[in-house]
Image (cartoon, helix red, strand yellow):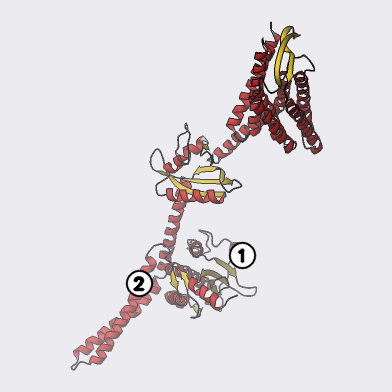
Amino acid sequence: MSYVTILWSSCAAAALLLALLHGFAWVYDRRAYANFAFAVAAFSLCGAAVLELGMLRAHTPQDYGEAMWWLHLPLFGLIVGIALFLRLYLRAGRWWLLASLIALRVVVLGMNFFSDPNFNFAQIDALTQIPFLGEQVTVIARAVTGEYQWLATLAVVLFPLFILDMGITLVRRNAAGDRRVAAVIVAPVFATVLISSALTQMVVWGIVELPILVVPPFLIALTAMTIELSRDVLHASRLAQDLRESQRRLDLAASAAGAGLWAWDAATGRVWATERARTTLGLAVDRDIDVADVLRSAHVDDVPELKAALKHALERGGEHALQFRILAPEGGTRWVGMRGTVDLHENGKPALVRGVVRDVTSQQRTEEEVKELRQKLAHAGRVTMLGQLASAIAHELSQPLSAIQHNVETAQILLARDPIDMSLLREIVDDVLRDDRRAADVLQRLRTWLKQGRINMEVVRLHELVQDVVTLVRSDASTKHVAIDCKVPRTLPPVRADRVHLSQVLLNLIINAIEAVSSGAGPQRRVSIEAHVCSDGCCEVSVSDTGPGIPPDQLDRIFEPFVTAKSEGMGIGLSISRTLVEAHGGRLWAENAPLGMTGATFHFTVPLETEVVESDELAHPA
């Protein structure tokens, strides 16, 4: 049995296995340069084992010299690979020592290509056989050392010197694990490299007759490095197990919330998504997907907005959210809500995008139903208030109609006379036209109130609007013996609002005030309307009454839907009013009169017309 063949073949196989493992690790992660350097060193050791075995079995000086000539190639990869691995993995050692070592090895390798039989020997005269591991192996009996062998010797000295400097750096740095790494990696590598290098140089310089042994000592060095790398593999395995467990928990939590998880690697374009995320987006669950698949599943009307949002998120980074429609595989459309964060590289380029996706179709439908219900309630509120004002409107119409009837009867009398008084008849006709226009205006206001529609923003003069509303309620107020005091100056700047909706808010507040005053027994039955400009670019309107005020326990709840103190009220008037005011960008609130006084005051704000605000700022700069 040849122990030499078995040992060197085993070394070659072990080195090849290590080279493949770390080579695949580098292919998977191209930034793992330490693994690449280790793979080069291990593969070079495999080649060195084959050539060194050929030297031990050489029959002629020519065979021995040729094998040693080729040995310089794997020897270069072995030394440089180990040196680079240690520097990259341990982040220690002086760069100039590493650069000097690599430069000398390059010079030796280059000169070897032009040497015969090789760089180390000028000529090999004779070989001999010596016993080694129970059998005879070939060694050099007589040879002439090469003229420039001192360069190789200098390179051999630099290699252990670089490793020693690395160990000293680790000990002095004394960071977490540095002393252990110095003991587990640096010390064995330094010892084996020093022994192998010293033995090889003694053979080349003709001091001893021994075989050149590079492979076994360097395999020990690689084994020491592999043991330390195995710790990283075990640690990575534990981290992977913890990560899988965390992912299962996260999937469970996301599923409980009805959400799916996804991640997009912007560099490779690959998209990872859980099964729920794929189902929510209408994508296949058994094949690779990319961003184009998501865009294809989106509704055609939402694709431009989706692309713009994606571009904005990739440029700005951070957290973003959006909602869009997708075409469901079973037909129809679904709404999905997507929220995620964008991680950027130091150069501002997107690195990783990850987030959650959730089916929000039911939520979207609920919001649309609530919006539609709110509009219907607002419309119902207007109709309800108009029913309460029917008598006031009838009174408004009775006056012009009665005047028209009186003028027409007078005109009939004039037409029966001879001669006809044409000037008086013209005056009667003018009165009829004026009263007809007045009646038409009343009917037009009624038609506008009954018309249901969206908010139509326009320039509104508050003084005119308040006067119109007061005109509508004055008859009802007179019937209930309530005085209306309007203190809205004509000089108020215009506001931007929907005239109908703003009138509805003011009308609701005035009617509530009239009812509050008429239900009390106080000596003063008065409703006051005031307005003034605020410093924040809004106009504040206040409706005050002298009624009993608002019960303290209801002061914070009166704007909630279906909360009312009236026996016949619906409890939606104030809720609708607040919604309308907030839709204008203002706010509505209430407060009781100061201590010692009775009544309550409702305030609401509405933004001033923008052009007026800008002109005021130019006229009165800060």
Residue 38 position, x and y percent, is 66, 28
Q: Position of residue 261 (x, y in %)?
A: 54, 39
Please tell me in which quadrant of the rendered image residue 156 appears.
Answer: top right
Query: Which residue is rendered at x = 71% and y = 13% of the image?
Result: 125
The kind of secondary structure element at disc 1 is: helix
Amino acid at pointer 2:
Gln
Q: Which residue is mark 1?
A: 552
Helix, strand or loop at disc 2?
helix
Residue drawn at (78%, 34%), measured in percent from left and top? 165
- In the displayed structure, does residue 375 sit left or right of residue 10? left
Q: Which mark is residue 444?
A: 2
Residue at 66%, 25% (x, y): give it.
112
- Residue toward you, 95 or 278: 95
Q: Quadrant of the N terminus?
A: top right
Considering every residue shown, the one lying at the far top of the view is 1
Compare marks 2 and 1 and give the one earlier in the sequence: 2
